[in-house]
Amino acid sequence: MFESLSQWEAGVLRSVAGLRSESLTHFFSLVTEMGSVKLIALLTLGLVVWRWRHSRRESYFFAASVGGSAVLIKGLKVLIQRPRPNGVEALAEVTSFSFPSGHSMGSAAFFFAMAYWVQYRQPARAPLAFALAAACTLLIGMSRVYLGVHYPSDVLVGWVLAFGMVYAAKRTFLCDRCFPQGSD
């Protein structure tokens, strides 16, 4: 399934590895931590608990967006079992399979769920929220390729799946037709 992609992606990884420097490695090592499973899980749990007291459907929205993405990540990694990239030095320690990128998918789900929530609560601030979500998501995805622990397709597919999960959760839980005023 990945054979034809792997040759092109190996070239991308080698090109990116040629750009490595001490300062970029430090920067992308910090950026990649913004998408760590532990941090995203902790932030999501905090949001779910906080919103539960005020709006259960918003709590469900965050849980479905990020929790659903986490379940999908685990299932696809076990099902597909794509090995990590080889041919470039990995600058981060990893133990799971490569496809899809958990950092990329989890962080995209979290940051875009936050952006949709801002759009739902404060529509005037939505453009800024989506710009910040896109910037964080892009940087975290780039960090995974820069660090040599993911192929570009791992990151891209993770983003697409996360966007789909968040959009489905938005249509389900932030839909005023589905939850009339006062039904929380």
Image (cartoon, grey):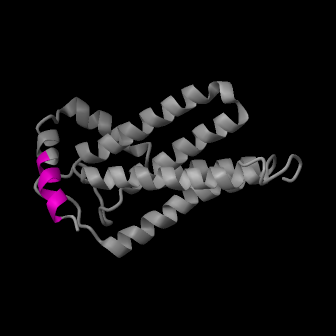
Q: Is residue 167 left or right of residue 33?
A: right
At a point 53% along the width and 33% down the height, the residue shown is 130
Looking at the figure, which quarter contains the N terminus? bottom left
Residue appearing at x 30%, y 41% in the figure? 142
Q: Residue furthest front?
A: 177
Residue farthest bottom in this picture: 79
In the picture, measured across the screen, residue 162 lies left or right of residue 88, that is right
Left/right of residue 7 with respect to residue 96 in the rendered view: left
Classified by dominant secondary structure, the portion drawn in magenta counts as helix
Q: In the picture provided, is 79 more to the left or to the right than 181?
A: left
- For the magenta stretch, what is the residue range? 3-11
Asked if residue 108 is among those painted magenta in the image, a careful observer would answer no
Q: Residue at x 43, y 33 (%)?
A: 135
Relative to 171, is 116 above or below? Answer: above
Q: Is residue 169 above or below residue 12?
A: below
Residue 92 in the image: state x and y as whole percent: 27, 51
Give the vertical position of 98 relative to 57 (above or below): below
Q: Is there any visible trace of residue 32 in the rendered image? A: yes
| Residue 39 visible in the displayed image | no
In front: 127, or 101? 127
Q: How many marks?
A: 0
**Spot occupied by residue 66 in the image (x, y as percentages of width and height):** 55, 55
Residue 132 percent across, percent down from the top left: 50, 31
Q: Quadrant of the rendered structure where residue 4 is? A: bottom left
User: Foreground residue, 63 or 90?
Assistant: 63
Camera-side residue: 120 or 45?
Answer: 120
* Vertical comparison of 183 with 132: above or below: below
Q: Position of residue 100 (x, y in %)?
A: 35, 60
Residue at (26, 49) in percent of width and height: 152
